[in-house]
Amino acid sequence: MNVLVTGGAGYIGSHTCVQLIEAGMTPVIFDNLYNAKAAVLDRIEKVAGKRPEFIQGDVRDKSALVAALKTHDIHSVIHFAGLKAVGESVEKPLEYYDNNVNGTLVLVDAMRAVGVKHLVFSSSATVYGDPASVPITESFPTSATNPYGRSKLMVEECLTDFQKANPEWTITLLRYFNPVGSHPTGEMGEDPQGIPNNLMPFVSQVAVGRRDFLSIFGNDYPTPDGTGVRDYIHVMDLADGHIAALKRLNHRKGLHIYNLGTGNGSSVLDMVKAFELASGKQIPYKIVDRRPGDIAECWADPSKANKDLGWAATRSLQDMTTDGWKWQSLNPEGYPE
Ligand code: NAD
Ligand code: UD1
């Protein structure tokens, strides 16, 4: 089965391509390399034993998408491509709506033109806003507090309306919690450009000596140790969730929504301790003010995905930090240019 993977050169997309190959499927990567390096293709080949086809293109380019879908006889699309930095989205809302919302509309239009009717979309737990309670089920109300989150919510709504009007389509919205870690070989991992926005890439850059200390954004939240609690999920488990969605929902037309999380919450200090254990390095930190827009706690009820997709996260916090450290220590500057 040939699968077009938009954004497949990025962090989650590249790990998913490895698991697609392992599952006997054929990924075709469509990425404009805005936030990725071509070297990732060598690493996918090294790890999975097969080099994926690569098309350098933009999801806002309908004719390039139509050509890719036709030439490669695509059966399904996994749509990772987009921009993902919350702070940047506040500064550049137009760019976020253009890449994330317009990009998705152009992609669906291209798929319709060719007759490809199976789409898996990368959504986020951010669509739950500040949840009234935890764990979060798929039926919780949705809201957005920044343009990034709003772009995910808008895409979810557009795709829901589109699927209603086109009941022969299969569209799956996967709401990721906090993906971390890397391929266990350490050949592939997260390679943020500039100062990392997210916790674990920052922690690993402190461990490897690229940054002096971690700033912990607040220790006065109503959580067991006062720091924010999240549902960290190993990127390989997340990748497997996509394979499960493609396989299980292949013949189930409809609009499907799943949380991809572990169901466990860990605090910032839990993550720092786990990373220290995995790396044998001390992580110096300072407590600073809360980050605007942050919430106290957020973790998934993944039972719907467990039941319907036959999928569950199996990798531990120790796997996440051990594999993350392997990648960072073997590739202190990330992928080569
Ligand atoms: P990433 O930035 O590593 O990957 C995104 C990829 O899309 C990059 O390779 C980039 O070059 C490409 N891209 C961006 N705009 C494009 C465009 N217009 N045309 C073609 N390619 C384009 O990010 P990631 O962490 O792998 O995230 C993948 C998806 O998952 C994103 O949609 C993101 O919003 C979503 N998501 C990520 C997280 C997370 O914590 N990483 C959490 C929830 C949801
Ligand atoms: C962030 C995004 C969210 C996105 C998610 C996954 C914000 C406000 N939210 O969520 O939309 O879906 O990433 O990509 O950016 N922390 C520190 N110091 C740091 C970095 C983080 O203490 O240098 C803390 C945060 O306060 C939080 C936890 O670590 O409690 C996790 O932060 P992060 O990795 O940025 O993820 P989220 O805030 O959950």
Image: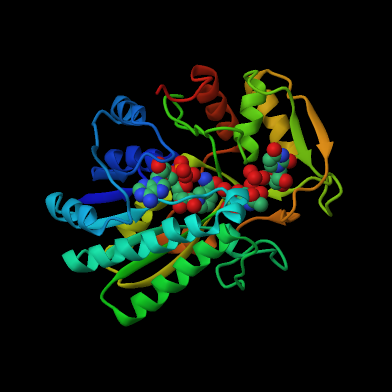
143 relative to 18, above or below: below
Occupied quadrant, residue 267? top right
**In this picture, residue 75 sits left or right of residue 295:** left
One can see residue 327 in this view? yes
335 relative to 232, above or below: above
Residue toward you, 92 or 87: 92
**In this picture, residue 254 sits left or right of residue 189:** left
| Residue occupying the point 35% across, 76% down | 162
In the image, farthest residue toward the bottom? 165
One can see residue 239 in this view? no
Q: How many marks?
A: 0
Image spot of residue 121 (x, y percent): 40, 59
Image spot of residue 305 (x, y percent): 47, 60
Image spot of residue 327 (x, y percent): 50, 24
**In this picture, residue 64 sits left or right of residue 129:** left
Occupied quadrant, residue 15? top left
Residue toward you, 255 or 202: 202
Occupied quadrant, residue 296? bottom right
| Residue occupying the point 22% across, 52% down | 64
| Residue occupying the point 60% across, 70% down | 142
In the image, farthest residue toward the right? 220
- Colour mapping used in the image: rainbow
Q: Quadrant of the C terminus?
A: top left
Image spot of residue 28 (x, y percent): 24, 44
228 relative to 40, above or below: below
| Residue occupying the point 72% across, 49% down | 229
